[in-house]
Amino acid sequence: MSVKHSEFSTSAGITEHFFAVTCGGGYDFAAEMAAVMAEYREALKQYSCSAADGVLMRFHLSDVTNQLPVLQPVISGESAFISVVGQPPAGARIALEAWHWCGAEISRQGDAVAAKLQNYTAYWFNVPALETSGSAAQTGEEFIRLQKFLNLRNCNVADNTVRTWLYCRDVDNNYAGLVTARNEFFARNGLTADTHFIASTGIEGQMAAVSRLVGMDSLNYAGIVPGQMIYLSAPEMLSPTTLYGVSFERGTRLVFGDRSHYFISGTASIDKEGKVLYPGDVRAQTGRMLNNIEALLASSDGKISDIRWGTLYLRDIADSEAVTAIVRARLGENIPLVTVKAPVCRPAWLVELECVAVNGAGNEQFPVLR
């Protein structure tokens, strides 16, 4: 069993807690699931958290179609936003990532969860079932339904969506349709290379329904104003995504009065010309990946030591021990980190990391996170 935890707080705002829980070697999925949930509940008590202040619980499962019916009754009463994705964890059948905001009022609003604070409301949103087929049509439907949800709250994707996660079944064959539909939606809604896109991870991941080729989670904020979101780039290290025909930001910094959140998109071993570096060498790719993330954070008052939570994606799960060791050596042994099998959008990329960083680099012209 492994529970990792990190936290961040200021004298003015809320305390945030990040957890990662894995359990390998159980008799079956039900046994592993019970062990993970028991350890998670115990960790909540240890760090003075509760189920009531959870904003996100993301489960990575080794066989989501067969395992979700077993998991569903256990999580049906949770107040947090629930994300379940088929991405086999290293050495386990189930892994859990969780984010808690002590002081937030959590409520369900249809397909969304709202985390209400004094100054902001964060909306976590996904669509449980789609009406279309094919990766392009399903991606388009995901964004259209997100836009409708936000419009009802006087928000929109361009101004209020901070982060998306796009999970694509059989990414080698279906990612192209995802990219086309996202590009088209952004173009119709004023998101361009001259304005901005959205921080995002597009990665192999399965929904429980085998006909579901694309699933999307999103994080959206009501109450933010122009200038509060900063879009990260490090052109000396990583090319703009538009250079190879995709539309997402390398990372986004969301500045509050007392802190900054950094949402680093799925980042791999890429150079400033958009080329894959170190083909076939997963260790070298891991080093370059971490250097790229460090450069993105440094571009806007961040440091690699500010990372609080990460998800490590591998094309070959046999690389997990070596790669995880390299990442932990750089980020810290106790960083909440989940390692899963999830091929990246280009076959030559063997490893990718997404992460959340938090530091005290706030701006007093904006309200604090409380």
Image (cartoon, rainbow, N blue to C red):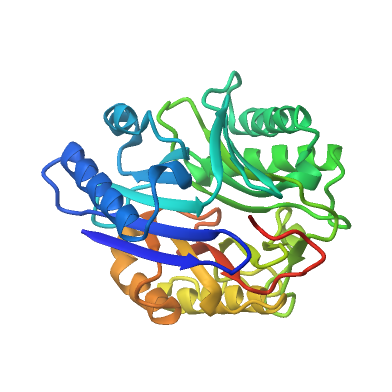
Q: Which residue is rendered at x = 38% and y = 64% of the image?
A: 5
Q: Position of residue 18 (x, y in %)?
A: 44, 59
Q: Which residue is rendered at x = 72% and y = 75% of the image?
A: 300
Q: Position of residue 328 (x, y in %)?
A: 38, 75
Q: Using the rendered image of the protein, determine whether residue 312 is visible from the camera's viewpoint.
A: no
User: Is 157 left or right of 170, judged from the image as shown?
Assistant: right
User: Is 16 left or right of 155, judged from the image as shown?
Assistant: left
Considering every residue shown, the one lying at the far front of the view is: 11
User: Is 144 left or right of 134, judged from the image as shown?
Assistant: right
Q: Position of residue 79 (x, y in %)?
A: 45, 36
Front-most of 108 and 347? 108
The C terminus is located in which quarter? bottom right
The N terminus is located in which quarter? bottom left
Front-most of 171 and 265? 265
Q: Which residue is rendered at x = 11% and y = 44% of the image?
A: 27
Front-most of 136 and 190? 190
Q: Using the rendered image of the protein, determine whether residue 232 is visible from the camera's viewpoint.
A: yes
Q: Quadrant of residue 261?
A: bottom right
Q: Position of residue 188 (x, y in %)?
A: 85, 37
